[in-house]
Amino acid sequence: MPALRVLTYNIRSLRDDEDALARVIRACAPDLVFIQEAPRFFRWRKHAARLAAKSGLVVLGGGATAAGPLLLCSLRATVERTEDILLPRAPGQHRRGFATAVVRIGGARIGVLSCHLSLQTGERYEQAGLVLDRLAALDVPYAIAAGDINERPAGRAFRRLAAELQDCRAVAPLGGEHTFPSERPVRRIDAIFASEGITVQGCGVPQDLPGITPADLSAATDHLPVLATLTVPES
């Protein structure tokens, strides 16, 4: 099948420059967008729909009903089903969740999951395990998980994911590496993971794409996006 473009992006509840954010997303020309920190309160569906429209996409699932993770897609995607998952919450910690879906793009059937893992080390490790459990429960031949992992690749949660999934940036580095903070990035805490059998053509921060400027990347939100080009076999 033709290459599939996958983007993950923490958008800080649209508190920054929404037009700059939409320009960055449009320039990446993604088929699937894994959002974290989507608006969760007043008129959140309207905000999500507006961002999707500005970006030339449609809302696939998630948002407040997933405690922040959101999925957007292009019209290449045919939606089979969606499910928003709220995770167990440790006392005093922020509520977390997953936005999940099964889609068909071309001849490929793919499970997708957007996540934003905990700031607390132990809870984050447990949530990484829940990501893997949820992907398995989707019962699909191929899967992609992406999001704000809230730790670097050497961390326990990140390593737990990378032990069973391909860390796309590590497999085929392309573009920038570090994702946070957006103005002077020093840490890679946002990532795209793909199941075995998916070919990773390239993955990283899209710094040099036509239409993307340093000014927009800084103004859009406090994270930088990660873009991967993947080939998923027909299933």
Image: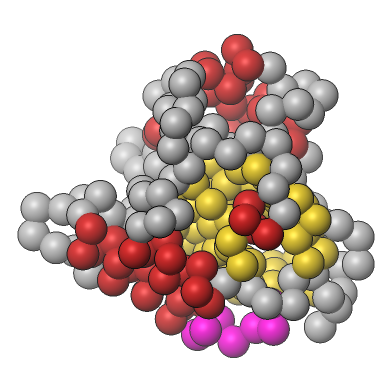
Quadrant placement of the N terminus: bottom right
Quadrant of the rendered image containing residue 43: top left
At x 69%, y 28%, the residue is 207
**Magenta residues?**
136-142
> Residue 31: in sight, yes or no?
no
The image shows residue 192, relative to residue 85, as above or below, that is above
Say above or below: 189 vs 4. Answer: above
**Residue 38 placement (x, y as % from top left):** 44, 42
Image-based side of 91 in relation to 195, left or right: left
Answer yes or no: is residue 107 visible: yes
Residue, far top: 215
Looking at the image, which is closer to me, 220 or 178?
A: 178
Q: In which quarter of the image is the C terminus?
A: bottom right
Please check the rendered image and state whether residue 84 is part of the magenta-colored stretch, yes or no.
no
Q: How many badges with numbers are in the image?
A: 0
Q: Which residue lies furthest to the right in this view?
A: 1
In which quadrant of the rendered view does residue 172 lie? bottom right
Q: Which residue sits at x=64%, y=74%?
A: 195
x and y percentages locating residue 93 in the rendered image: 16, 53
Is residue 15 rendered to the left or right of residue 95? right
Residue placed most toward the observer, 19 or 44: 19
Residue 52 is situated, as x and y percent measured from the top left of the image, at 63, 39
Residue in the picture at 49% in, 46% down: 190
At horizontal 43% and vertical 66% (from top left) the residue drawn is: 159
Colour pattern? secondary structure
Point out the residue furthest to the left here. 91
Q: What percent of the width, then of the height, locates residue 217?
A: 58, 22
Q: Is residue 50 above or below residue 197?
A: above
